[in-house]
Image: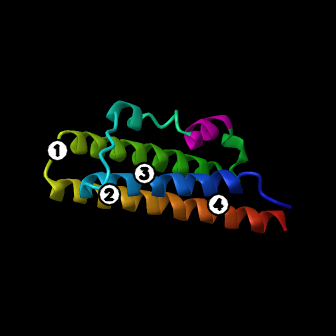
Amino acid sequence: MEIKYTTVFDNTISAHIAWLVRFENVLNGTDLQTFDPKAVRDDTICEFGRWLIANPSVFPKVEFFEKVKNLHHDFHGKAAEIASLLGSKSDPTVIRQQLDQLQDISSQLVELLFDIQDFSKLKIK
């Protein structure tokens, strides 16, 4: 039996990696993209945010849902800080530190999504 949200989780992981790459490229000067910090902060308008709000019951444990929701919110908050720093041409060292923190949040979220998939596979068998 295939878990319905595996594709959503895979897309989420890819999207978070893409944000990290975009920020890195802007910081390194290889991309001139600009970001609206207010839009970046809103964790309910991205594909995963909309899905998360609509599907809390698909999580095998309430604790998983709460952790994912909080990490996703934290990711968007930190991403908005970085977007603001990039927009104001802040010190690259400060931006790099924020990117490291964003990477940590992203890693925690990805690890949790993998844990949920593994837990769900165990429960289905």
Q: Given the image, on which type of amino acid does mark 4 rest?
A: Ile
* Bounds of the magenta segment: 47-54
Tell me if residue 50 is in the magenta stretch: yes
| Up/down of 43 relative to 113, above or below | above
Q: Are marks 4 and 1 in contact (CB under 8 Å)?
A: no
Of residues 42 and 62, which is closer to you in this image? Answer: 42
| Up/down of 76 relative to 122, above or below | above
Give the numbered dot on residue 36.
none
Q: Nearer the viewer, mark 4 or mark 3?
A: 3
Q: Residues within 10 Å of mark 2 (few under 14, many from 20)?
A: some
Give the secondary structure at mark 2.
Answer: helix
Give the numbered dot on residue 19.
3
Q: Residue at x 47, y 61 (%)?
A: 108
Mark toward the start of the polypeptide (1 vs 2): 2
Coloring basis for residues: rainbow
Mark toward the start of the polypeptide (4 vs 2): 2
Image coords of residue 53 (percent x, y) = 61, 35
Cα separation between marks 4 and 2: 29 Å
Residue underneath mark 2: 24
Q: Is residue 2 left or right of residue 67?
A: right
Q: Residues within 10 Å of mark 3 (few under 14, many from 20)?
A: some
Image coords of residue 8 (percent x, y) = 66, 50
| Up/down of 121 relative to 95, above or below | below
Q: Given the image, on which type of amino acid does mark 1 rest?
A: Lys
